[in-house]
Image (cartoon, rainbow, N blue to C red):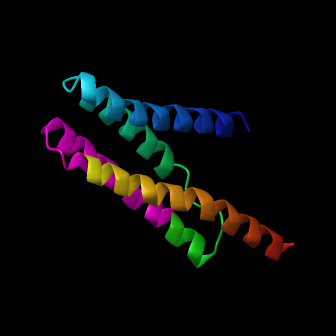
Amino acid sequence: MLMRNTKDILLRISAICILLSAIIFLFLPEIAPWLMGLSVALFSVITVISPYPGKSIRGKRLFNIQLFACVLMFVSTYLMFRQRNEWVLAMISGAVFLLYVAIVLPKELEKEMNKNK
């Protein structure tokens, strides 16, 4: 239980730091990519070590979408390091996928748990 809470806290902190790095980029474009890179790395590691616990195909597909969103965040970080403005598109795309997964995945897991009872 403690490990789960720690993962959740680190995941939330890294997500906030990702958003902060996008804002900081406006004022300090030489520091923001480093914050973004560390935050995306932490977010992605926690995502990878916390796979979908259920058996449904839809849940596994949603987890794969979440992994793809992490890849988009890495692309965004790379583009941010290269001072390319396209980093915003990659970041927004990843954020939309993550938002979709954050809404649908808990519902899918709950539906699967109710089905198993």
The x, y position of residue 23, in whole percent, is 35, 31
Q: In this view, does 60 lie to the left or right of 31?
A: right
Q: Above or below — where is 3 with respect to 29?
A: below
Out of 19 and 106, give the one closest to the viewer: 19
Q: Give the range drawn in magenta.
A: 63-87
Q: In this view, does 11 lie above or below 32?
A: below
Residue 44 position in % (x across, y down): 42, 46
Which residue: 45% across, 65% down?
Answer: 64
Q: In the current view of this chain or complex, which residue is farthest to the front?
A: 26
Q: At 45% across and 41% down in the image, what residue appears? A: 43
Q: Looking at the figure, which quarter contains the N terminus?
A: top right
Residue 18 horizontal/vertical position (percent): 40, 36
The C terminus: image quadrant: bottom right
User: In the drawing, does residue 67 fall left or right of residue 3?
Assistant: left
Q: Is the magenta stretch mostly helix, strand or loop?
A: helix
Query: Within the magenta stretch, is there residue 35?
Result: no
Residue 36 percent across, percent down from the top left: 32, 34
Q: Is residue 47 left or right of residue 104?
A: left
Q: Does the magenta stretch include residue 80?
A: yes
